[in-house]
Image (tube, rainbow, N blue to C red):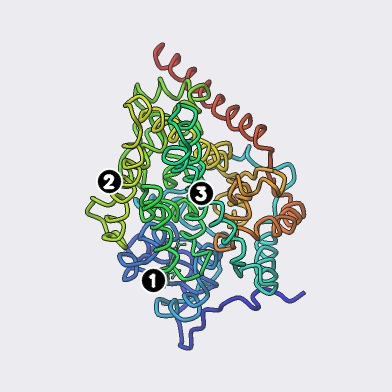
Amino acid sequence: MEKYPYNLPRLEVNKELPVYTCQEFRERILDGEYLVIFDGYILKLNSLISNHPGGPLAVFHAVGKDATDEMRAMHPDIVVSERMHRYVVAKYAKDEKGVSFVEDLKLTFSKPTPVDSTVSSEKPIDYEAAQEDYRKLMVFLRDNKFFECNYMHYYKEMFRLACLAFGIFAFILWFGKESTLKVVLSACCASIFWQQAAFCAHDLGHSAVTANRTADTRLGIILGGVFGGLSVGWWKKSHNVHHIVTNQPENDPDIQHLPFFAISPVFVNNLTSTYYEKTLVFDRASEIFVSMQDRLYYIILIFGRFNLYAESWKYLLGKGYVPFRYTEFVSLPIFWMWYLWLLSHLSSWKLMLIHLLVSHGVSSILHIQITLSHFGMPVTSPDPKNETFIARQVRTSMNVDCHPLVDWFHGGLQFQIEHHLFPRLPRHNLRNVRPYVKELCKKHNINYIEEYFIDGNIFVLKKLRETADFVKLYISSSSKS
Ligand code: HEM
């Protein structure tokens, strides 16, 4: 078979370049240069950082790393072949092995993955060989048009959304005399509608529908903002970071949930969040909640959606750069207008409250689905310096096994591993790609975790309980000393 790279977009540089050794690369980073390795070239990204369309944090987390696979996975071809060359300043001497050279640099903007050699799989992984095969798989998928979106699938999604939207209104406005049952049915339609809309907004957020970032983001704002009351920009900001630094305790906002949850004992160490730019203090409230987190898991998730509304508004009203700020500003009030207008047709406060609580409570299914993908997976790596993109993404993600007939219910999140390896791959192709990924993981001894939905829940609860037990011990030992 042809050796990588072929039929992948190339970064071409037609000028003489200096060659930086690893030591020079490191020294320059310590001097304030934001250097990233892509395909053997060193890119200096100081001038890009503040106006990078994927946000500054995505770039910060690539500094000091060979981010070839991350960058290919997140960008359309044109960015690689026509935009990146401007930032190339040198070639990398490859005098040291590894994909991350920052483990000992103590950077403020990006923290390394903690090391834990007990996380290793039974047989050692040849990270480079796995990377080579991952890249070949990428070529195969491109050649066989897996990255092309079949719109027929989205027509079905639109039909499903239309039926659910009809249910939301019909049970209250059109189906005869008011009753608690009809209010509950309308609320259930609303929560399933929001769940399905969130799946589509997720695809759009990755530009995996039209492949045009502006068009997809606008459609995402309609689905997520107008129909769901959530800011797509806020979600994209944290989600892009989550994809680059999945399950890294100090960098990944998707696992930073103190005082309510800690998915690993490392969170007792008052870590610094590079996303929230603050210390994640493991205080008394954290001790109480985390020591009971396996029992509180579902209860807390019931209130998850209210937190998302608050985060969306905080983001839109904040001082930072917000793409499509005004469109988003208009979209969120429209959501509250139609939702409150609907509730205004109910005859009592009690029924309004039932609708609000049931619709938002049942929405917790989505939060369970989201957290299931990573909460049970390790935050530490046996060898972060050498662990390549594919090995890291598979180590930190879990799939949910299900019958194809219920794929719609899981919305693509069930193929979390494939999604993290190929974030721009259209959702409806994830199932077809799964056998190739499984085979690749098997060949390279990479642990591919896939559970049925109920087993996956049990798996996550067990992991949460392990950390809860650790915290109980930690509290009792610190109260004795
Ligand atoms: C020379 C370096 C880079 C250039 C010129 C560049 C440019 C761009 C451009 C033009 C987009 C918008 C793509 C679209 O229209 O869909 C984008 C998106 C993105 N970039 Fe970069 N980028 C660079 C480096 C990086 C690095 C180092 C990372 C981190 C691994 C990164 C992560 C992302 C992400 C996550 C997005 C998705 C944004 C979104 O759709 O919300 N980029 N980048």
Task: Return the residue at label 1.
Answer: 44
Labelled pair 3, 1 in contact (Cβ < 8 Å) = no
Label 1 vs 2, first from the N-terminus: 1
Query: Residue 406's image quarter?
Result: top right
Q: Which element is circle 3 on?
A: loop
Labelled pair 2, 3 in contact (Cβ < 8 Å) = no
Label 3 vs 1, first from the N-terminus: 1
Task: Return the residue at label 3.
Answer: 246
Q: Residues within 10 Å of mark 2 (few under 14, many from 20)?
A: few
Image spot of residue 241 (x, y percent): 43, 53
Image spot of residue 184 (x, y percent): 48, 31
The numbered disc on residue 314 is: 2
Q: Residues within 10 Å of mark 1 (few under 14, many from 20)?
A: many
Q: Amino acid at mark 1?
A: Lys
- Of tags 1 and 2, the one toward the viewer is 2
Image spot of residue 394 (x, y percent): 63, 50
Q: Which element is circle 1 on?
A: strand
Mark 1–mark 2 distance (CA, rounded to whole Å): 32 Å
Image spot of residue 253 (x, y percent): 42, 45
User: Does label 1 point to a residue whose CB lies under 8 Å from ligand 1?
Assistant: no
Label 2 vs 3, first from the N-terminus: 3
Mark 3–mark 1 distance (CA, rounded to whole Å): 24 Å
Q: Residue at x 49, y 68 (%)?
A: 75
In the image, 197 versus 387, the foreground residue is: 197
Picture layout, residue 319 above or below residue 256:
below
User: Does label 2 point to a residue whose CB lies under 8 Å from ligand 1?
Assistant: no
Q: Amino acid at mark 3?
A: Thr
Q: Which element is circle 2 on?
A: helix
